[in-house]
Image (cartoon, coloured by chain):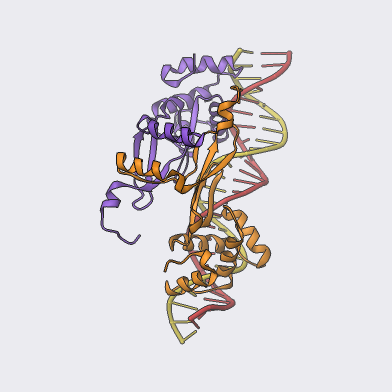
Chain colours: A purple, B orange, C yellow, D red
Amino acid sequence: MKAELSSGLEAVIEALRIAGCRITPQRRAVLAELVEQRGHINPAELSEQVAEKLPGMNAATVYRTLWLLDELGILTHTHLEDGVMYHQSERADHVHLSCSRCGSSEVLEAKDLTPLARLMQQRHGFAPDFTHFAIGGVCARCRAAPEKMR
Amino acid sequence: MKAELSSGLEAVIEALRIAGCRITPQRRAVLAELVEQRGHINPAELSEQVAEKLPGMNAATVYRTLWLLDELGILTHTHLEDGVMYHQSERADHVHLSCSRCGSSEVLEAKDLTPLARLMQQRHGFAPDFTHFAIGGVCARCRAAPEKMR
DNA sequence: GTATATGCAAAGGTTTTGCACAGCC
DNA sequence: GGCTGTGCAAAACCTTTGCATATAC
């Protein structure tokens, strides 16, 4: 069984235990916050959120916990235009399209790009995971709009 | 004519002048260093390099210069696993494939991905520029190798 | 001469690290 | 009780900003 946050906090906690890690209130708090978060969140913001609910919670601990959970595959990070974001691994199911002209960001289901991914793998041997970095480019609206200066 | 570093420093300098910018030794130094650099370089490192050749050169000036040149389209930045890198715009012709398993990074000519880009544009309306972010995934060697723990 | 660019210094923000103590198992 | 994890504080980085001065034009 793979530990996924969606299968419930307890499943992940069990996985942590099996990995020889200790279950602390701090780790529970980080996990709980990540479950509540629908989208991505950066470490700094997450740190604030968690601290609200578990006073005394230290930023260093948040960073260490994120590192651990990422290492165990429970979390994933994604690189967007403005930095690194964390989210539940099983929610690494969408791709960010980041428009360089208007700055907007749309989201695509990862599976919509599987044909492309497969093609790329066949042609270049590299099996891409388009969820790990955003994809830059120009969105449909900006392409349609008359060219403006930026 | 578009100002490109490869057309020579002087062409870019002329473009700067036309844009109403002043030509300072500092700006020349940054441009010169970027011409010498084959690949990508991050602002901090670039700052060091330039300071070696133009003593007194200040980091703040480097950042301001990079911002300006990026704004003018002479430079481009790319997001790799370990941060932002700058390079000459006309060298934004390659895509970084970053293997999440072994950490290696291969490079692909951007034009090798144009069919994919076109396909994506047709299907999703978004015209991707795969050079602006790296593409994460698993390289051919790691896919072939027996699954190891990470 | 005037407007722009630079240097300096300081602040801002994020992330990492060392170490003593606390607390999970 | 022993070892892992945490808090605290400091440091390490990277980047930005304000302001007086220097300088390109």
Residue A18 falls in which quadrant of the image? top right
Q: Residue at x 51, y 17 (%)?
A: A13
Instruction: Pick the residue in front: A20 or B23.
Output: B23
Estimate the x, y position of residue A41 in percent, counting from the top left: 44, 36
Answer with left or right where residue C19 lies relative to residue A92.
Answer: right
Estimate the x, y position of residue B111 in percent, counting from the top left: 45, 48
Estimate the x, y position of residue B109 in percent, counting from the top left: 50, 47
Q: Is residue B96 shown above or below A1?
A: below
Estimate the x, y position of residue B4 in percent, counting from the top left: 48, 64
Q: Is residue B90 visible?
A: yes
Q: Is residue B148 shown above or below D22?
A: above
Q: Is residue A61 shown above or below B11?
A: above
Instruction: Pick the residue in front: A74 or A139.
Output: A139
Q: How many marks?
A: 0
Answer with left or right where residue A17 lies relative to residue A35.
Answer: right
Answer with left or right where residue B48 lies relative to residue A62.
Answer: right
Instruction: Pick the residue in front: B97 or B43.
Output: B97
Residue extending furthest front? A123
Q: Residue at x 55, y 73 (%)?
A: B24
Instruction: Tell me the quadrant of the picture where the C terminus of chain A can be found.
Output: bottom left
Instruction: Pick the residue in front: B13 or C12.
Output: B13
Q: Is residue B45 shown above or below A93?
A: below
Q: Is residue B132 visible?
A: no
